Image (cartoon, grey):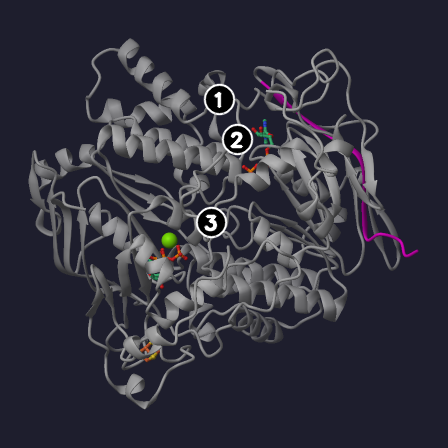
Amino acid sequence: MTSSTHISVKDIGVHFTLGRRLIGKPPVLRAVDGVSLDIPKGCFFGLVGESGSGKTTLGRAMLKAVPITTGHIKYDDGDVQYDIATIGKDELKDYRSRAQLIFQDPYAALSPRMTVRDIIAEPLEVMGITKTREETDNRVREIAAKCRLNLEHLRRFPHAFSGGQRQRISIARALVCEPKFIVADESVAALDVSIQADILNLLKQLQQDMDITFLFISHDLSVVAHTCDHVAVMYLGRLVETAPTRSLFNAPRHPYTKALLSAIPSLDPDDAGRAQRLSGEIPSPANPPDGCRFHTRCPHAREKCKIDVPKWRQMADEHFVSCHYAEELAEASEPVPAG
Amino acid sequence: MTKPLMSVKDLTIQFRTDEGIITTVNEISFDIAPGEVLGLVGESGSGKSVSAKALMRLNAGNAIYGPKSSIVLNLDDGPVDVLALRREKDMQVVRGGAVSMIFQEPMASFAPAISIGDQMVEQLLVHTNMSKKEAREHSIDMLARVGISEPSKRIDQYAFEFSGGMRQRAMIAMALSTSPKLLIADEPTTALDVTIQAQVIDLMKELVDEYGMGILFITHDLGVIAQTADRVAVMYLGNVIETGEVRDVIRHPSHPYTKGLLNAIPHLHDLDRPLTPVPGDIPSPLERPTGCVFHTRCAYAIPGKCDREIPSPNTMSPGHTSACFVAKEIHNNEAEAVA
Ligand SMILES: Nc1ncnc2c1ncn2[C@@H]1O[C@H](COP(=O)(O)OP(=O)(O)OP(=O)(O)O)[C@@H](O)[C@H]1O
Ligand SMILES: Nc1ncnc2c1ncn2[C@@H]1O[C@H](COP(=O)(O)OP(=O)(O)OP(=O)(O)O)[C@@H](O)[C@H]1O
Ligand code: SF4
Ligand SMILES: [Mg+2]
Ligand SMILES: [Mg+2]
C-alpha cells in the first residue's frame, strides 16, 4: 500500500493495577506492553492473537477509551492530526466523531431502555451532526437498511433481538456518523456464515466507498484472511508477527502464528489429526515469562528462548517477526493447511 | 434402544410483543442421547437460543409455549416434564443441576459485583454436597482445566477484569463444575483463539467420555461442528430444515439453505473466492412466509408449490432428513437452480 499512514502506534503500554487484598506494592498487569505499528489510510488492518493478549485493550487505547500508560499514538486523517496519548478535551470531542468502536459483546453494549432507533441515532444527536429529527430519522433508516436491519424493528428494544441482530445494531450505530477510523472488535463473531459474508462485504464496500480505515479484531483466521490487507498477531501483550495478509498466511514465521493456523478446525469430520496441539502452561499476563513470552508453549523453544527477548526483525517485504529461530523454522515450514 | 436423555417434540415458542404475537420456533423435534453431541446451527435469529433456553425454562415472561410442545428429561429416577414445572424450586434440576448452560452472553451470566470464585462456589453449594472448602478447591481445579493461569489468584477477581475469552472459559468451568448430565453450550468458543478453543473442545469431549454427558452445541462455526458433533440440526426461521449425522449433512447437504450456508464459509486455501452470502432478504418475523419458510430466498423454488405447500421432512439416508420438495435431487447433486 502506498497511501499515507493514518495511525502510527509507538511503543504503547496499557498497564492495569491489580490492587485488592494484597499488602505492599500492588501487582501490575501489562495488558499491552510496548506495541508499535503503522496503519495506512484506508487499510483493513487485522489484529489476531491469543484471548487475553490485549487486542481489545490496544483497540480501546487507539480510541482513548482506556488510560494510556506509555508511548504515543499519532492520528492523521488528512484533516486533523492528534497525539491520542496526550489529546486535550476539545480535540477529544472532535476525535470521537472521527473514530468509532464496534463492540465485542453486543449484549453488554446496548442500553436496554433505548429503542433501536434511539441507539443508532444517539451518536448523531450527541455530536450535533444532524439538525432536525427528520434528518436524523433519514440517516438512521439509511444505515439500518445498509446493515440489513428490518425497518419495522427500529421501534423495538434490544432485548427482543438475537445475538446477530444486536451485532448489526452495533455496526449501524458505529457507522451512522460516517467515521474515518473504526475499531471492529469481534464484530462478526456472533453471525451465521451467510450474514457474516454479507456484513463483511458491506464493511469492505464501505471501506472503499468512504475510505474508512479499519482495525479488525478477530479470532476467525479465515475471515481475517479474506478481508484484511495487513495482519498483526499478538501474544501476551506484545506483537509477535506482522505482515501483508498473503505473506502471513502463505509463509507464517512465528511458531505461535503457525500453531494458530494449524488449530483451525477442519470442515472434514474425519480430518482431526493434523491440528498441532500446544501444550505447556498458559502464562498469566500479570506475570509474563522471561525471554520469549511464548517459550512456555512453543514446540521449538531452546535454552536461549528462556533468557533472551527475541528482537523484532524484518523477514521479507513488510513482514516482521520476533523469534530467535524464525529463519531456521521458515525453511522447515510446511504449506498452509486447507481451511 | 436406550432412552434419550432429552426428548423435544413439536416445540413451538411464540412471544407476545407490542406488534403482536411472533412465532420464533415452529414445531421442532430432536433427541439427545447420553454421551451424544448434537450440533445446532442455523441462521442468526432462527431460534437456536430460545430453543435452548426453553430446555431450562429460561425464556422471558412474554414467551408462550405451543399446546403440543413437549420437553422430557429422562433421569435415573424417572422422567421430568420440563414444560410442566411450575415452582422455582422444581426448576433447579434443569438450571444447574442435571442440566447446565454456557450462555452466549458471557458478561450477562456473571453478576458484576460478586467475584468469579464466589459465584462458582455458590453454584456448587446449591447443586452438590460439597463443603465450602471443597467447592473452592474444585472451582480452582476447573479454572485450571479450561486454561486459566494462576487460578488460585484469578478466582477472586471480577468478571470485568477478565478478557472476553477468559470470561467465556470461566463460564465453561462453572457450567462443567457440577458434572451435569446435559450441557447446553451456546456459542461456547466464539471468543477464544483457536489454540485454546481446541483445548476447551478436548475438555468437553473428555467429559462426554468420562460421564456420558450429552451436549447441545450451538455454534456458527461449521468446522467446530464437524470436529465435535455426532449429529447436527440446521435451523432457518424457527424450523429445523435439515438434520442428520454430521458426515452426511456436511458431505451431502440436502436442503438449499444448508447448501448456501456451506457455500458461504470462507476458506483459507482460496482467498480469491469472493464471500458468497445466501442471496435475498431475511423475512420479518411478523410475516412468516407461507409454504416453505425458505422459498423467498431459494434458487430452487417451484412457483405455485413451494410458496403454498409446507414440505415435510424427506428421508435421504437413515437419520438424515431434509424438509424440501427437491431434497432428493439436491442430495444427489442433480438439482438445477431456477433463479
Ligand atoms: N479493567 C481491567 N482491569 C484489570 N485487568 C484488565 C482490565 N481490562 C482488561 N484486563 C486484562 O488485560 C488483559 C488483556 O485483555 P483484553 O480484553 O485486551 O484481551 P483480548 O486480547 O481482547 O482477549 P479476548 O480475545 O479474550 O477478547 C487480560 O488479562 C485482562 O484480564
Ligand atoms: N423476549 C423476546 N421477545 C420477543 N422476541 C424475542 C424475545 N427473545 C427472542 N426473541 C426473538 O426470537 C428470535 C429468535 O432468537 P434467538 O436468540 O433464539 O436466535 P438465535 O438463533 O439464537 O440467533 P443468533 O445466532 O443470532 O444468536 C429472534 O427473532 C428474536 O428477536
Ligand atoms: S523465540 Fe523461541 S520460544 Fe519464542 S517462539 Fe521462537 S522458538 Fe519459540
Ligand atoms: Mg477482546
Ligand atoms: Mg443465539
> Within the image, what quadrant is residue B30 found in?
top right
Of the image marks 1 and 2, the number of the one nearer the N terminus: 1
CB under 8 Å between callouts 2 and 3?
no
Task: Tell me the mark number nearer the camera, choosing from 2 and 3.
Answer: 2
- Residue A257: within the magenta? no
CB under 8 Å between callouts 1 and 2?
yes
| Chain of the residue that carries numbered disc 1 in the rendered image | A
CB under 8 Å between callouts 1 and 3?
no
In the depicted structure, whether residue A260 falls above or below residue B47: below
Cα gap from disc 2 to disc 3, whole angstroms: 17 Å
Judged left or right of residue A124, residue A71 is left
> Within the image, what quadrant is residue B149 found in?
bottom left
| Residue type (three-letter) at the residue carrying disc 3 | Met
| Image coordinates for residue A313, horizontal then vertical, percent | 19, 71
Residue at the spot 42% in from the left edge and 24% down from the top edge: A116
Q: Which residues are magenta?
A: B1-17
User: The residue tagged with tag 2: helix, strand or loop?
Assistant: loop
The answer to whether one can see residue A220 in this image is no
The residue beneath circle 2 is A161
- Residue B15: within the magenta? yes
| Residue type (three-letter) at the residue carrying disc 1 | Arg
The residue beneath circle 3 is B107
In front of the other: B54 or B268: B268
The residue beneath circle 1 is A156
Is ligand 2 within 8 Å of the beta carbon of the residue shown at mark 2? yes
Cα gap from disc 1 to disc 3, whole angstroms: 22 Å
